[in-house]
Image (spheres, rainbow, N blue to C red):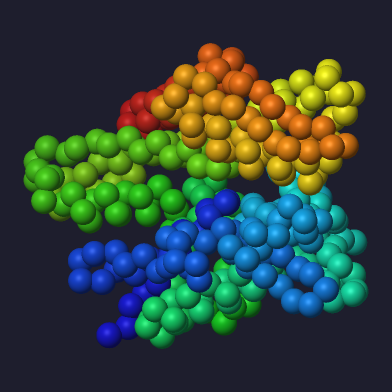
Amino acid sequence: MRHVIGISVGSQNTVIGVLKNATVDIILSETSNRCVPTLVAYNDRDRSFGDAAFSTIKSNYLRTISYPSRYLGLKADSAFLEEETKYATALPSIDSNGKVLFEIDYKGEKESMYPEAVMGTFFDKLKLNWLKAGYDNKDIVVSVPDYYTVAERKAMIEAINIADLNCTALINESSAVALAYGFFKRNQFEADKPRIVAFVDMGTSKTTISYVSFSKTNQKVLSVTSDRFCGGREFDLSLAKFFSDIFKKKYGLEPIKSNKNKLRMMEAIQKIRKILTVNKEATLSIESLMDDEDLLYLLTKEEFEQIIAPSVENFKKIVQKSIQNLLHDASN
């Protein structure tokens, strides 16, 4: 029996699943993780993907393309490109036709890497994971952000084709979430009394809030509201700026201006951010961050909340907007 492979391409991580015997079988990565870092790295000998690319990102950041799916279909005049560049490792360039590309030193030569080709090689590598798990299939369904434009969707399909895969459907993330919820909760729904469920998805780089109606025989997405840049990495960048300012006051140095040091801070910040979800304080400790000087700071939960307050306010606005959109769509 042939199974359709489902792929959730996240900004930071990608998950592969297969519907099998009324359950979803998650395909493990080469390192037996349930997700694969969405990264492609280049060096003087070869390319690396996922966990292998992540393991060298701090030493090879100029040749590591992070968040590749967020550059699909973008051009020089895109309103989102400048903001996205704040989080880039390998910096994007623009070709003579206004398309986004990455100029990478690969095997001793300067190569032009377009996002579609980068994602294509990433899909090609992902394919090995499900082949290893015993699923010999080229048919895939890929979830994409609801806000993806026609150009972004075409670019995603081009990337899939480069990997010699057959995309049977691109499905909006809100629809994918609703289908998953409806599949596993279907026995709880009533025929004549629809249940309306709100799904709030804040990821690494974006937030999507969707409202879906479920009944015994039907499900319908009522409203979707998205923000391309409200996510965990926005919190991390605010914290990185805070710690960089502290370091500057003490040593006269700005680690955030160095991509390598910025990556080291962001990695440490992600850890303390998780600690602060259940603790009142956490210590950030980075040895020899810059010019052999250490960064050591005890961050309280109260300080953390003050630092990320602008992002939290933005999130609140998204929630309010989602409710307004739901009411507007319902009235129509």
| Left or right, 277 with reference to 37 | left
Measured as percent of width and height from the top left, residue 260 is found at 79, 46
Q: Which part of the image, by quadrant, shows the C terminus?
A: top left
Looking at the rendered structure, the number of numbered marks drawn on it comes to 0
Q: Quadrant of residue 150?
A: bottom right
Which one is in front, 229 or 306? Answer: 306
Q: Which part of the image, by quadrant, shows the N terminus?
A: bottom left
Taking the spot 57% from the left edge, 71% from the top edge, the residue there is 123
Taking the spot 81% from the left edge, 52% from the top edge, the residue there is 91
| For residue 135, above or below residue 315 | below
| For residue 195, above or below residue 276 | below
| Left or right, 218 with reference to 17 | left
| For residue 139, above or below residue 102 | below
Measured as percent of width and height from the top left, residue 6 is found at 40, 66
Taking the spot 66% from the left edge, 63% from the top edge, the residue there is 53
Res 155 seen here: no
Res 196 seen here: yes
Taking the spot 77% from the left edge, 27% from the top edge, the residue there is 244
Q: Quadrant of residue 71?
A: bottom right
| Left or right, 104 with reference to 173 | right
| Left or right, 1 with reference to 121 | left
Measured as percent of width and height from the top left, residue 330 is found at 33, 31
Measured as percent of width and height from the top left, residue 124 is found at 58, 76
